[in-house]
Amino acid sequence: MFLSYLNETSNFPFSVSLVIVAILALIEGIGLVIGAGIFGFLDGLLPDIDLDIDVPDMTAPSIGGQFLTWLQIGRVPVIFSLIVFLVAFGLIGLFLQGMVTAVFGAPLPALLACIPVLVLSMPVLSVGNRVLAAIIPRDETSAVSHDSLIGKPAVITGGEARNDYPAQGKVKDQYRQTHYILIEPDNDQDIFPQGQQVLLVRRHKSIYFAIPIESDGLID
């Protein structure tokens, strides 16, 4: 009965959201088992919205920045926020379609139903992020200050990093959590192949700049 309700065309976006949650939870669970935050690199793609926010005029923050701040985006790992949103979107959508069907005898078209469900999901996401930020211990989350990674050793894990062409790398924070970030050489002439050990020296937006290091003992 419930499975047939999930498979109805009018409920397709909401059912897919819940399926994606299950898949993400499985992948992240595997990452925790092997000791790697598979989705950690998503945090580096967010704009800063905390005290180290990069905005040209602090007296007139952008509407987008205010919206992200209201949603509490960045206070917890991005994967947590994504899961909260998908769960809210899926459950609210199924509930709304059930209520509409009970009252009017037929559900809303899927695309039309997504509009009010999306709006209703935003406050849930905001509250969910706030609650998670309050209950998740800091040594259990990758939501650390971006600038706190500066001065730490990292290793190039994907591609080749060179001037204007950053590559993916990984670095451990003070809580031993692994973060996946974008790294570019601080010296325009340097080229970092995959496996190169580097030292993070500065950051611009989502890109970290690094210099090569020679000692293998700095990376574990």
Image (tube, grey):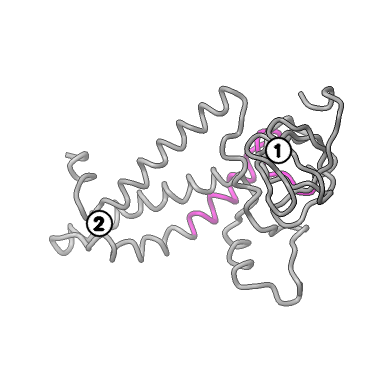
Q: Position of residue 21 (x, y in %)?
A: 42, 41
Q: Secondary structure at mark 1?
A: helix
Depth check: give the residue in front, 63 or 107.
63
Q: What residue range appears in magenta?
A: 123-147
Q: Position of residue 206 (x, y in %)?
A: 69, 53
Residue that label 1 marks: 138
Residue at image position (39%, 53%) is: 89
Where residue 103 sits, quadrant-wise, is: bottom left
Q: Is residue 156 above or below residue 207?
A: above
Depth check: give the residue in front, 192 or 39.
192
* Amino acid type of the residue tagged 2 in the rendering: Gln
Residue at image position (25%, 52%) is: 11
Quadrant for the C terminus, please. top right
Residue that label 2 marks: 97
Q: Secondary structure at mark 2?
A: helix
**Disc assigned to residue 56:** none
Count of labels shown? 2
Q: Position of residue 64 (x, y in %)?
A: 59, 68
Depth check: give the residue in front, 99 or 60.
60
* Amino acid type of the residue tagged 1 in the rendering: Arg
Find out whether residue 28 is within the magenta segment: no
